[in-house]
Amino acid sequence: MPRSTPQPAADPQPRAKAARGYELVVIGGSAGGIEVLNVLLGALPAGFAPAVMIVTHLPPDSPSYLVDAFAHRCALPVIEPDAGERIMPGRVHIAPPGYHMLVEVDRTVALSTGAAVRFSRPSIDVLFDSAAAVYGERLLAILLSGANDDGVQGLKRVRALGGTTWVQAPDTAGSPEMPRSAIERGAADFIYTPETLARRLAALPASF
């Protein structure tokens, strides 16, 4: 029997979730995720309140072009943070190639050259897990297109600690394995198309 495709969430989302203010948005993606990130970041208004942290799977030995590429599309400052740098509201933090990016308890950035997780460094799971431990219910985690299951355990950790999880609809993903795995393993609060992800993200409350 063919596998049924999970459907995007109805619009609008439940009132309790829609009204929540988030302090941090963490986003992870792999193959096919850059295109969606261009849509999401391009939709953010200049007054967007939460901090944003992004992990994508990139070759570890090549310089990243993402900061420059996203800065041209995004109204917010886009940086590749240094270790110890404070996580700032209204700023987009991009994980550097070859380093895990984590959230410290004092809400600063940690960078690690520890072992790859799910064959990846930086790892989406590592970011999501560390952010969940610090931000709890004030965390929104978004998982995009990708070809493995990195990020799924991190999403489950976010949900367990009271945060919210959004997952790209697999039938809109260039590589549907990652979002499909998250949905099948019960890690998604809401399943959205890229266009709805962008609209929901841009409409987040400006206050905490």
Image: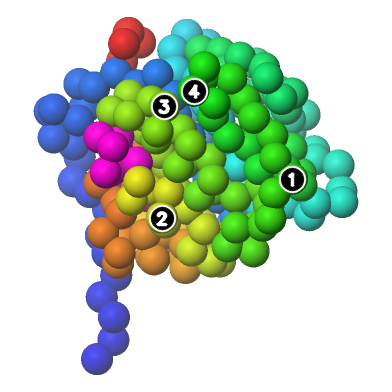
Residue type, numbered disc 3: Val
Establish if 201 lies above or below 85.
Answer: below
Which residue does the numbered mark 2 point to in the structure image? 153
Which residue does the numbered mark 3 point to in the structure image? 134
Residue 178: give x, y in percent of width and height. 47, 62
Image quarter hosting the N terminus: bottom left
Q: Can residue 203 be seen in this view?
A: no
Question: Of tags 4 and 2, which is closer to the observer?
Answer: 4
Residue type, numbered disc 1: Thr
Which residue does the numbered mark 1 point to in the structure image? 113
**Picture quadrant of residue 194:** top left
Establish if 37 lies above or below 46.
Answer: below
Q: Residue, x 42% and y 49% (percent of image)?
A: 154
Contact? badges 4 and 2 (CB < 8 Å): no
**Boundaries of the magenta span:** 158-168
Residue type, numbered disc 2: Gln
Q: Residue, x 47% and y 68% (percent of image)?
A: 177
Classify 10 Å Cα crowding around label 2: few (below 14), some (14-19), many (20 and above): some
Question: Dot 4: what SS?
Answer: loop
The label number, if any, that marks residue 68 in the structure image: none
- The answer for how far apart the CA atoms under marks 1 and 2 are is 20 Å
Establish if 48 lies above or below 68.
Answer: above
- The answer for how far apart the CA atoms under marks 4 and 2 are is 20 Å
In this picture, residue 71 sits left or right of residue 167? right
Contact? badges 4 and 3 (CB < 8 Å): yes
Decide which of tag 4 and tag 2 comes sooner along the chain. 4
Contact? badges 1 and 3 (CB < 8 Å): no
Which residue does the numbered mark 4 point to in the structure image? 105
- The answer for how far apart the CA atoms under marks 2 and 3 are is 16 Å
Q: Residue, x 21% and y 27% (percent of image)?
A: 18
**Picture quadrant of residue 134:** top left
